Amino acid sequence: MRILAKFKLKKMLSIFVILVLMASFALSVRQVYAEQTGGSPESGATSRIKTIYDHLKDDLGYGTDAAGGWGDWGAYWNRIRSASEWIPDGTVAVTDVKSGKTFYDGSRAEQTGTYPNPSSCSTQQYHDSYGAPVTQTTNCTNTITWTTAAPAVTGDDDDANTDPRTGLIWSRCIINSGGVPTFAATCGTNWSWDGTTDADNIAVGGKTAAQLCSERDNGWRLPSQKELMQAYIDGSYWNLLNPANRFWSRPEFTASYAWYVNLSDGYTDANSKTHSNYVRCVR
């Protein structure tokens, strides 16, 4: 009987040791995935929560460690919670985005742009201002309605001055007013591109065409050739004061020539930098 009792005792002790070892192994596995709390020992391994936190913070820059409307759950959970509630923010609307292109703004729901895709100008005539019966309503860009910039700044064209397709705002012409470059409703002053050969440039201190715009403040600058050409395509003839003139652009054609564009018919060519054309700015 004593032998049998000893055997049973040894068997029970063996089973107990096995159970303790199994529990210790299970605990060590769980410690890898659990956060350290209170006085619990550090597992020595990075938990899954910490891995997510590091990715949000260091790799993506999403979320914040600060408390939120849910309270203060600690840096890790605050960042995870705030990242999960993030909503894309901006000022874009479906009418601003090219038709068929998707985006997110103001919600986490995917939105699709409705802005018309560019089309060929089959009705665009070389001289819109002279080629009857072409009018603003038969022009290839007749769907574009120019607006007035708000808030307005000194120099804004008096009529509709903002091309909604490009977002560019156009100025009045710049004239020489007693030796001072000034915006005016009439285009009465010719300027050389290089600023050194026309009497008006010399009278205002030898300012180049680019300087005439950039020194007017409010972000005014001399437009590029393509910006002037696009303004014509989008309807500058019907929206800007005195478009029937040749306006200097920023790009050079050669060391001695620069591009100009006529805003009433879209004609573009290169003139000698010493030649005289009008100056209109953009911002």
Image (tube, rainbow, N blue to C red):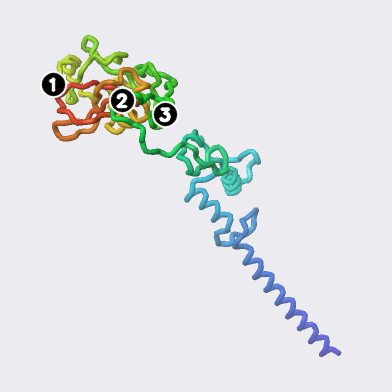
Dividing the image into 4 quarters, which one contains the C terminus?
top left
Q: Secondary structure at mark 2?
A: loop
Q: At label 3, which amino acid type do we have? A: Asn
Residue 274 appears left or right of 52: left
Outermost residue on the top side: it is: 178
Q: Nearer the viewer, residue 30 or 131?
A: 131
* Residue 147 x/y as whole percent: 43, 23
Labelled pair 3, 1 in contact (Cβ < 8 Å) = no
* Residue 208 x/y as whole percent: 20, 23
* Residue located beneath label 2 in the image: 131
Q: Which mark is residue 56?
A: none
Q: Nearer the viewer, residue 186 or 133?
A: 133
Q: Secondary structure at mark 1?
A: loop
Q: Earlier in the sequence, mark 2 or mark 1?
A: 2
* Residue 27 x/y as whole percent: 66, 66
User: At 66% from the left edge and 69% from the top edge, which residue is drawn?
Assistant: 24
Query: What distance separates the C-alpha of mark 2 from that of mark 3?
Result: 16 Å
Q: At label 2, which amino acid type do we have? A: Gly
Q: Earlier in the sequence, mark 3 or mark 1?
A: 3
Dividing the image into 4 quarters, which one contains the N terminus?
bottom right
* Residue located beneath label 3 in the image: 142
Query: What distance separates the C-alpha of mark 2 from that of mark 1?
Result: 35 Å
Q: Is 224 drawn above or below residue 14 in the view shown?
A: above
* Residue located beneath label 1 in the image: 197
Q: At label 1, which amino acid type do we have? A: Thr
Callout in the foreground (2, 3): 2
User: At 55% from the left edge and 61% from the top edge, which residue is drawn?
Assistant: 45
Q: Nearer the viewer, residue 36 or 163?
A: 163
Quadrant of the rendered image containing residue 66: top right
* Residue 126 x/y as whole percent: 29, 30
Q: Is 88 drawn above or below residue 41 in the view shown?
A: above
Residue 165 appears left or right of 276: right
